[in-house]
Image (tube, rainbow, N blue to C red):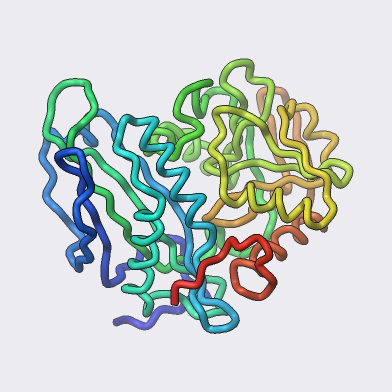
Amino acid sequence: MQEIDYSNLEFGYHPTDYIVRCSWSNGKWGEVEATTEFTFPIHVSAACLHYGQLAFEGMKAYRCADGHVRIFRPDFNGERMRRSCQALAMPELPVDLFVGMVEQVVRLNERHVPPYGTGASLYIRPVMIATTPQIGVHAAHDYLFFILVSPVGAYFKGGFQAHPYVITRDFDRAAPKGTGRYKVAANYAGSLLCHRLAVEQGYSSEMYLDSKEHKYIDEAGAANFFGIKDGVYVTPLSDSVLPSVTNDSLVTIAQDLGIKVERRQIPVEELAEMQEAGACGTGAVIVPINRIDDPAMNRSYVFGEPGPVTRRLYEALTAIQLGEAEDKHGWTRIVI
């Protein structure tokens, strides 16, 4: 195996040894299988290719300070995937089966878990697809659930640094009462053009407003948004925002630290009253935001370098994930 420089590893796919998979057929889940085969045949009329029945998750395994490998809040991811599958009329994967398969695939690929202290981790990608060959708009009868892993570095190069974002008023991320609250492939496909345009303009990512009124902050690209206003942690309350493991954890940590938390609608203009801002999610944990431009309104909201509250929250959460701090909420699970 080629030697990997984990300290300079990019966020992307790198081959590992095994995937695990399990099929749904005849109304029940089959046996879990570990395999070194990373491709599988799929019919040209498989429902996932035509009607978008595809849900997935994203999580990480960490080599920790004490030498153990831990995963972070897998039950949250399992429950979120169950809801995503329910929304797409797919069979709901039991959370205990989900967590067991996550643990199994991490153990099988232990040698690919990056060393502690490199800033890299093992990314875990559970996926469910509809495999029934069909032409006709209805839910499939057959499904495949599989989990792949890959060692990854920081989502953005340069580590914990602030990035510029831009508000888009030409694209909507998700409709009210639609699929925005679920982790399904179509949500991300619909954001790719907008993201590419933002990057071409020199921004790290785009920001979406609510699709109904275009008045309130919705999400920060593919991540949840939060702001710090007079010492208060403020994050959007919206039925079209994906419930984030990271954001939920940051809310709890903020409360532990005595920081007041508000989940509510955030008018765009309120950005002017915030001292710090960030995007949060599994890939990057927190991406501090140094500036949010709103070209259509000829406004720019400047926050500067990562602020003290954002940094404190980031350090507190990553310390738990890496086994450096007490896990008093029981979020981490030792796998190895």
Q: Relative to residue 169, is residue 257 depicted above or below?
A: below
The C terminus lies in quadrant: bottom left
Q: Nearer the viewer, residue 279 or 93?
A: 93
Residue, far right: 230
Q: Position of residue 60 (x, y in %)?
A: 48, 62
Q: Nearer the viewer, residue 331 or 118?
A: 331
Q: Relative to residue 265, is residue 260 depicted above or below?
A: below
Q: Position of residue 302 (x, y in %)?
A: 78, 42
Residue, far top: 213
Query: Is 73 left or right of 52, judged from the image as shown?
Result: right
Asked whether residue 305 appears in the rendered view, the answer is no
Residue positioned 42% across, 31% down in the render: 190
Residue positioned 43% across, 34% down in the render: 187
Query: Is 283 left or right of 99, judged from the image as shown?
Result: right
Q: Residue 47 sits in which quadrant?
A: top left
Residue positioned 58% across, 38% down in the render: 206
Disc count in the image? Answer: 0
Q: Nearer the viewer, residue 316 or 73?
A: 73
The N terminus lies in quadrant: bottom left
Query: Is 31 left or right of 116, judged from the image as shown?
Result: left
Asked whether residue 18 appears in the rendered view, the answer is yes
Q: Position of residue 96 (x, y in %)?
A: 39, 55
Residue positioned 38% across, 69% down in the render: 106
Q: Relative to residue 137, is residue 248 depicted above or below?
A: below
Q: Residue 50 sits in which quadrant?
A: top left
Q: Position of residue 149 (x, y in %)?
A: 36, 63
